[in-house]
Amino acid sequence: MSCAVLLLLTACQQARPPEAEPADAAAMHVTSPAAPASATSVELTLPATFPQDIYLPAQRRIVSVANIAGMQMVTLVTAQALPAVYADIEQRMQGQGWTRELAMQSDDGSTLAYRKADRQVFYQLVGDPGGGTRLVVRLGSGD
């Protein structure tokens, strides 16, 4: 497992350990299809509160959406190759006024982090087994 994946997993675990229950059940909302996308007609959409200045590929299939105590996380798959998604994220996010704070690439995937005012966004990109790219986007307040 690459350092980038470990960093993202560590950050997510620090936000809320898997065995801990949220103090307020309303503070946590996770949506994901019950079966693989090929076996279900569930089509997920972005929450209405998802910021418009966060880049996501136009051609995508949303796999899961989570809101955990104010941190939004979206997992999606796109048919675009990983290098193209990486380049699009770089161009679009900086074009929207975001400052890149981290850029890591390895054979396993890539991680990008951006900050804008008091917000922070992390992108974790890995090749999807079916081709294309699997992308996890985590948004929150940047402390």
Image (cartoon, helix red, strand yellow):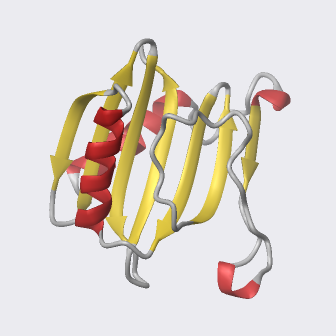
Q: Residue at x 48, y 38 (%)?
A: 54
Q: Residue furthest front?
A: 95
Return the x and y of residue 23 as percentages of the image width and height.
Answer: 77, 22
Q: Is residue 51 left or right of residue 99?
A: right
Identify whether 85 is placed above or below 131.
above
Q: Residue at x 39, y 20 (%)?
A: 116
Is residue 69 or residue 49 the one in the foreground? 49
Please tell me in which quadrant of the rendered image residue 60 appears.
bottom right
Q: Residue at x 73, y 61 (%)?
A: 44
Return the x and y of residue 125 as percentages of the image width and height.
Answer: 34, 57
Q: Is residue 5 left or right of residue 74?
A: left
Q: Is residue 94 left or right of residue 67?
A: left
Return the x and y of residue 18 as percentages of the image width and height.
Answer: 60, 42
Return the x and y of residue 30 as percentages of the image width and height.
Answer: 73, 47
Is residue 29 or residue 116 the one in the foreground? 116
Q: Residue at x 76, y 41 (%)?
A: 29
Identify whether 124 is placed above or below 81.
above
Q: Evaluate whether residue 6 shows in this view.
A: no
